[in-house]
Image (cartoon, rainbow, N blue to C red):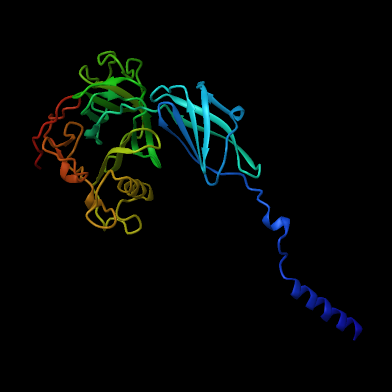
């Protein structure tokens, strides 16, 4: 009996206590700030974003290549680092230690590209997704305003999923210029990226009238399904996109008809970023441009009267031998 009574009293004591209140262990914050992003917002400013109010001591911040940190100011969960001018499109590495008001700290490393205040207006203008050895896969970019290409990024895919990514170095372009991004199986010594002299490179289908960029990409562009996207910088804003597919919504129930989770994800990301428009709530293969009929000599071209609607209506396939990579597009249309 005494044991039972003692057990009952102890049980009552435990029930009455419940969880500890006002405990130092319950209220203690031991979690450091989490880094949400690092981006350039001006030629002389870098923004660091965190999930809580944080600060970065000057002696705990290092940049490579070196940029002189002139001032570090914290505003809530954002830290602005004022630096000496960055080189547009140049890759930098930032290493820093951030801490919150309770002294919890985290050391992190991030890459960013020099801010470019003169990104030109440009569009994807011609695409060859079904290339050959003599006529490799290629993407043509047309420039509409003078500017600098530093940091502009073209993806064979999207930022979240790509087969190839090229970040342009800094070089000047003028309205009416063309840039050709060649996707070749293997690079030849003479296939050198151009940034000043349009005639400095030679190789398979090099253009003396356009800037040639060479990408060793054995996979090339997708022949039947694909996404190409153009951004002002890695992690930046979309400039243009192109979605193509020869499939239908009934082709594959699991992937919206696109044939793979990868292509569906890229299509959804392109639409979400504002690079392509859909007829309905969800992207379908019918929203894409159908590449059937295109070949190594019948490219997919943006129409001369295109209003850049970000739909398949902007595009057409040209007849054989009417590809115009590096020059103004032909509005002739291939008919089967």
For residue 149, which quarter of the picture? top left
Q: Is residue 30 above or below residue 37?
A: below
Which of 173/40 is in front? 40
Q: Quadrant of the C terminus?
A: top left
Left or right: residue 311 compared with residue 274: left
Q: Residue at x 32, y 59 (%)?
A: 253
Q: Residue most toward the bottom? A: 1
Left or right: residue 336 compared with residue 4: left
Q: In the rendering, at what x and y percent does residue 280 appear?
A: 24, 57
Q: Residue at x 34, y 30 (%)?
A: 152
Q: In the rendering, at what x and y percent does residue 18 appear?
A: 72, 70
For residue 153, which quarter of the picture? top left
Q: Is residue 327 above or below residue 78?
A: above
Left or right: residue 12 compared with residue 151: right
Q: In the rendering, at what x and y percent does residue 52 appear?
A: 55, 46
Which of 310/22 is in front? 22
Left or right: residue 304 compared with residue 282: left
Q: Quadrant of the N terminus?
A: bottom right
Which of 292/143 is in front? 143
Q: Residue at x 24, y 36 (%)?
A: 130
Q: Is residue 20 above or below residue 206?
A: below
For residue 58, which quarter of the picture? top right
Q: Residue at x 37, y 32 (%)?
A: 233
Instruction: Count how many numbered circles sit on residues in the image.
Output: 0
Q: In the rendering, at what x and y percent does residue 212 appear?
A: 28, 21
Q: Is residue 189 above or below residue 121?
A: above
């Amino acid at each position: 009996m005494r044991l039972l009574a003692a057990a009952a009293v102890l049980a009552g004591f435990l029930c009455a206590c419940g969880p500890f209140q006002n405990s130092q262990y319950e209220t203690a914050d031991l979690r450091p700030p989490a880094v949400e992003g690092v981006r350039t917002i001006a030629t002389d400013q870098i923004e660091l974003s965190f999930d809580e109010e944080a600060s970065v001591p000057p002696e705990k911040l290092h940049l490579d290549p070196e940029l002189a940190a002139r001032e570090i100011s914290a505003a809530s969960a954002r830290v602005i680092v004022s630096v000496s001018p960055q080189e547009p499109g140049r890759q930098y590495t930032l290493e820093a230690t951030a801490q919150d008001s309770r002294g919890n700290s985290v050391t992190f490393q991030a890459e960013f590209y020099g801010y470019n205040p003169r990104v030109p207006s440009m569009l994807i203008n011609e695409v060859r997704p079904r290339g050959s050895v003599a006529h490799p896969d290629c993407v043509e970019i047309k420039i509409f305003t003078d500017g600098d290409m530093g940091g502009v990024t073209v993806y064979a895919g999207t930022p979240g999923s790509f087969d190839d990514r090229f970040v342009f170095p800094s070089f000047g372009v003028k309205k009416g210029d063309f840039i050709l991004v060649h996707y070749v199986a293997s690079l030849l010594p003479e296939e050198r990226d151009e940034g000043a002299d349009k005639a400095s490179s030679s190789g398979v289908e090099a253009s003396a009238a356009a800037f040639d960029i060479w990408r060793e990409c054995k996979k090339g562009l997708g022949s039947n399904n694909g996404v190409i996207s153009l951004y002002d910088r890695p992690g930046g804003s979309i400039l243009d996109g192109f979605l193509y597919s020869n499939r239908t919504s009934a082709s594959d129930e699991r992937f919206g008809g696109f044939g793979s989770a990868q292509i569906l994800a890229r299509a959804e990301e392109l639409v979400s970023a504002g690079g392509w428009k859909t007829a309905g709530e969800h992207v379908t293969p019918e929203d894409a441009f159908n590449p059937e009929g295109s070949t190594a000599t019948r490219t997919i071209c943006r129409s001369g009267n295109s209003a850049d609607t970000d739909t398949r209506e902007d595009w057409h396939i040209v007849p054989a031998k009417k590809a115009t990579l590096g020059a103004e597009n032909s509005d002739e249309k291939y008919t089967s």
